Image (cartoon, rainbow, N blue to C red):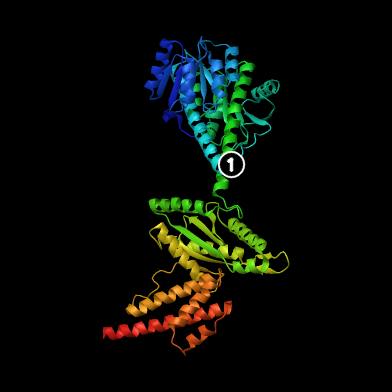
Amino acid sequence: MAALNSLGTTGRILLVDDSPIALEAIGSRLMESGLDVVMTTSPRESLGLATEGPQPFDLLILDVMMPEMNGHELTRRLRSHSRTSNTPILLLTSLDSTDDRVNGLVAGADDFFTKTAPDAEMLARVRSFISLGKMRAQLQAQHEAMARVMREPDAPTPPQARVEIVHHMPVVSERLARALRGTPVGGEFQLTQRAPSQRLGTSDADLLIVSYPVALEGEQPLLKRFGFDEEAPALLVVDEVESTSRRVLAFDAGADDYLTLQTPMAELAARLASALRRQRRQRQLRTSRDRAMLVAVTDPLTGLYNRAYFHEALGVEFRRAQRYKHPMTLVLLDLDHFKQVNDNLGHTAGDQALREVSLRLRQTARSTDVVARHGGEEFAMILPETDLEHGLIAAERFRAAVDGATVHGARGGSRALTISAGVGCYPAHATSMSELIELTDAALYNAKRQGRNRVCPVTVGAEPAHVPAPAPAASATNTVLERLRRLVAEDVEGPLTATRTAARMLHEASAPGDALHILTTQLRSSSDEVRQELLRVMDDLSRAVLDAGRVGGSRDHK
């Protein structure tokens, strides 16, 4: 019913009773238990406090017999206001008739108790409904926020409610079923029966009617699995005998209601309708919220998580890994030659390629892995509890899953797909999240430079320890060459201007008449062959500079 443990619940209550004596007696009992209680003897004043006050209430407790406005009418007015339409309402009465209870539930109250009820029972019920109120308020706030951002319509109400009876006595189960089928309960509902021996791990019912032994006794009591679970059905506990101690235990374990077999059927039907009304509204809010949240964090083309969610999830997982000293692996993947897919086969084929890669990555990943579209043709994966060795194995599995996939152009032609991947691991490679991203990104570019369709880990200590540091000039040259190499590698998937820019920079840096000067002078267009040649030239220059640095370093040493 609620996501909070009722035994530790605190909350804000509005208590309304025209009798100052009753108000003080009940209010003091509630305040002594640690609750924040606002009290008034005026129903009209309470209406303003509840709907227009500076702070919302978690629970409204209303006396039924009041001269200015009775509790039933006040309940109806509160239910018609947007601020209090979902706030739990308990009716307080000195009467104990079935008609009084039924009328209160029909008006929209969630439950009621008599003024002479034992303190333990009253406080258990109050704690239970405060937890319910907080959960409803949270769901409503999330729903409204998502609706404003996404302009999502409310989730449709299910056409038929689902009720399930789980009773340890088949005769009683059948009796309850017959009685409910012959009683109008706020519309049509589907009723099923289940024996306790049938394992009930989950349930898609809106309401479970369970016997006390099934709910709270035995090796696997139902309330231990479903009590205080936001996603669980509403639970109505039916007991054979009236017991205040058992009633308190049921409410404190998360039951939505507690009845005995002596409860009149008219009241049972009213309580059932009230519980179904609450539960279906909560499920509607959850469905709407979850759908809007999914849209907000999902890439619409691929169905994977989007970049924003990925970085939030990475932050959470990274901090968890630091806290518990567990490893985690980051994998960045890029679809090879994606620009050529778009240019040669069309953008529809490009979209098809992204969806196909996304599907294969999702099917290959574990349920605990986070798979996201990082942007463009790049994907990102978080592998919790995964060290470098197993991260590399997983990345190779992802690469192999995509290798061989084919996309077709609308006007003919096809292309096989491959991906390149960079793999970084905490704590093996990085001590911060930003460092892990940068190093893994560099590993991805390394996989691109080495020919694509491969997996490369982060390179740790690229320079051997015994190699002396190069001279300042050589270091600067190396920096320029690395920039050029990265520029050309990036150009594979982007505009051709980067390769031409790199060629121009090399042309200006070379001496007239040498081979490099002639090569760049003749460069008039960009192609894969030219790119590869430029990369080879820069690799040769890098080796030459490194050799020069070694010689210079040896001379200095001597």
Does residue 512 appear left or right of residue 259 in this picture? Answer: left
Which quarter of the image is occupied by the C terminus?
bottom left
State the SS at label 1.
loop
The residue sitting at the left extreme is 558
- The residue pinned by badge 1 equals 151
The residue sitting at the right extreme is 411
Does residue 349 appear left or right of residue 218 in this picture? Answer: right
Give x and y (percent) for residue 198. 63, 35
Give x and y (percent) for residue 69. 53, 13
Task: Locate residue 437: give its quadrant.
Answer: bottom left
Residue, x 41% and y 21% (percent of image)?
Answer: 38
Label 1 amino acid? Arg
Mark 1 closeness class: few <14, some 14–19, many ≥20 residues within 10 Å = few
Up/down of 450 relative to 423, above or below:
below
Residue, x 57% and y 43% (percent of image)?
Answer: 150
Residue 50, can we see it?
Answer: yes
